[in-house]
Image (cartoon, rainbow, N blue to C red):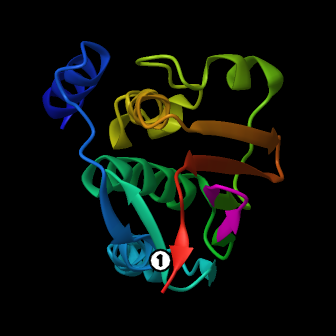
Amino acid sequence: MLVTNILQLNRLENQKIRPVPIPFNLSEALSRCILDFDARLEEKDIDLEVSLDQNLLLASDEALLDLVWNNLISNAVKFTPAGGQVKISLRQERECAVVTVADSGCGMDAETLRHIFDKFYQADSSHATQGNGLGLALAKRVADLLGGSIAVESVPETGTVFTVRIPETVQHT
């Protein structure tokens, strides 16, 4: 996994991966990614709240965005304690699709937030065996490449919210 992430990030940074914008149903793509975490959510007895603006079509690169969703959901599950909560939402806001992934996990302090998108940065060494510090750097690079953004808000001992905005003409079917 480390080698794969390093190679993907390197290819994204050197623009060897070019986005292929094709219209797809973002609600369905997010639902598919969420379902991949069903067993882990059940294992940790995490309450999942999902609010997806249905049938939201987006002309973007679905495969690249899957990297973002999978990373954010994985982190939310990883850092949320047993019995906690993860909330995922999708909405249209002007000419953007906006996805938020919120958790009731350990949260992050200001120092961690300053470095969270840096390659190989891992603030919480207790989870070091479950990742390699590249996921958020990959997610940031994908968002940038697609002309979007990724932002984070966090409060220690309360939780974290990641907000991804992907611009494009979005439409409902």
Q: Residue 67 in the image: state x and y as whole percent.
A: 33, 48
Relative side of 91 to 133, left or right = right
Task: Give me the residue at 71% from left, 26% from top.
Answer: 113
In the rendered image, the residue lying farthest to the top is 14
Q: Residue 82 in the image: state x and y as whole percent.
A: 61, 70
Closest to the observer, 93 or 41? 93
Query: Dominant secondary structure of the magenta stretch?
Result: strand
- In the rendered image, residue 95 lying in the magenta stretch gets the answer yes
Closest to the observer, 168 or 108? 168
Chain part drawn in magenta: 91-98
Closest to the observer, 22 or 116? 22
Relative side of 107 to 148, left or right = right
Identify which amino acid the numbered label 1 is placed on. Ser
Q: Which residue is mark 1?
A: 27
Task: Give me the residue at 71% from left, 17% from top.
Answer: 114
Task: Give me the residue at 52% from left, 52% from top.
Answer: 168
Considering only vertical position in the picture, is 136 above or below 13? below
Q: Secondary structure at mark 1?
A: helix
Specify whether residue 60 is in view.
yes
Q: Residue 135 in the image: state x and y as whole percent.
A: 40, 36
Considering only vertical position in the picture, is 166 above or below 111? below
Relative side of 141 to 162, left or right = left
Of the 4 image quadrants, the one containing the N terminus is top left
- In the rendered image, residue 73 lying in the magenta stretch gets the answer no
Q: Residue 138 in the image: state x and y as whole percent.
A: 38, 31
Specify whether residue 49 is in view.
no
Task: Give me the residue at 33% from left, 65% from top.
Answer: 23
